[in-house]
Amino acid sequence: MDTPTLELFHYWRSSCSWRVRWALALKGLPYKSTPINLLKKEQSDLSFLKINPSGQVPALSVNGKILSESIAILEWLEETFPISPLLPKDPWLRAEIRSYCAMIASGIQPVTNLRITGYYSNDPEKKAEWARHFMDEGFIPVETMLRKNAGTWSFGETFSMADLFLVPQVYNAHRFAVDMSRFPLAQAIYERSLKTAACDQAAPHNQPGAVNA
């Protein structure tokens, strides 16, 4: 298909946004970048709620049609633009990678995001303690899967969607002072990824509005 007109609504430090920015970079797809500042609660503005009623980022406009939720966006990108594939052809391995991604997207990220930690406490130390607890707990099965599958990347020697989910979560773990020496494979893949052009292009420190990234 012809390359559509893409506009990405995202927040610089959002792990879900980073996944999508990274996939767009890997597939060489140009897009208009529209920052949504979560700390200023721009996600709750009526103008954004008309775009994405959930008030969450990322949201991707495709020729004016809106797709939300990073997993759905990544699956659409993969199915529509097979260049630089993020999933292997083998059905079992595809399922294993999706399982790994779900462990992060469903088991770690949601319970450590701003909406949840803000409801739990207004105290920055208590919020950080909460995030560390669930990241510590969540990285145990992630590291176990890496011991089984990892090579250069999360699943052997081929980069995949699994890495798009892992690396932003490790970034968040560092923000909250999680001891990543307990999870050496995850840390190694994180460090390796940051040296790649597409990851760096999509990383928080290269986004509009980035502060102390």
Image (tube, rainbow, N blue to C red):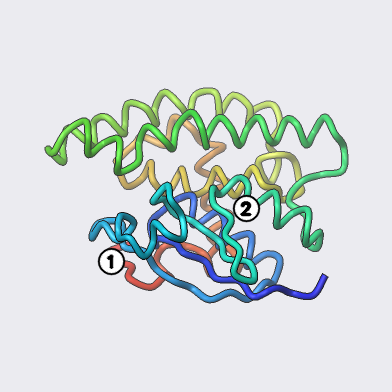
Left/right placement of residue 19 relative to residue 84 reads left
Left/right placement of residue 110 relative to residue 102 reads left
Residue located 75% across and 41% down the image: 156
Q: Hey, what amino acid is under mark 1?
A: Val
Most distant residue in the right direction:
90
Residue located 54% across and 52% down the image: 68
Which residue is under mark 2? 73
Label 1: which secondary element: loop
Task: Give the number of the mark in front: 2 or 1.
Answer: 2
Q: How dense is the environment of label 1, judged by Cα within 10 Å: few (below 14), some, or many (20 and up)?
A: few
Q: Position of residue 195 (x, y in %)?
A: 56, 63
Q: Position of residue 166 (x, y in %)?
A: 54, 43
Q: Quadrant of residue 60?
A: bottom right
Instruction: Please tell me which residue lies in front, 196 or 100.
Output: 100
Image mark count: 2
Q: Is residue 176 above or below residue 11?
A: above
Label 2: which secondary element: helix
Task: Say if residue 196 shows up in the picture.
Answer: no
Q: Position of residue 43 (x, y in %)?
A: 34, 57
Mark pair 2, 1: CA separation: 26 Å
The N terminus, quarter of image: bottom right
Which residue is under mark 1? 211
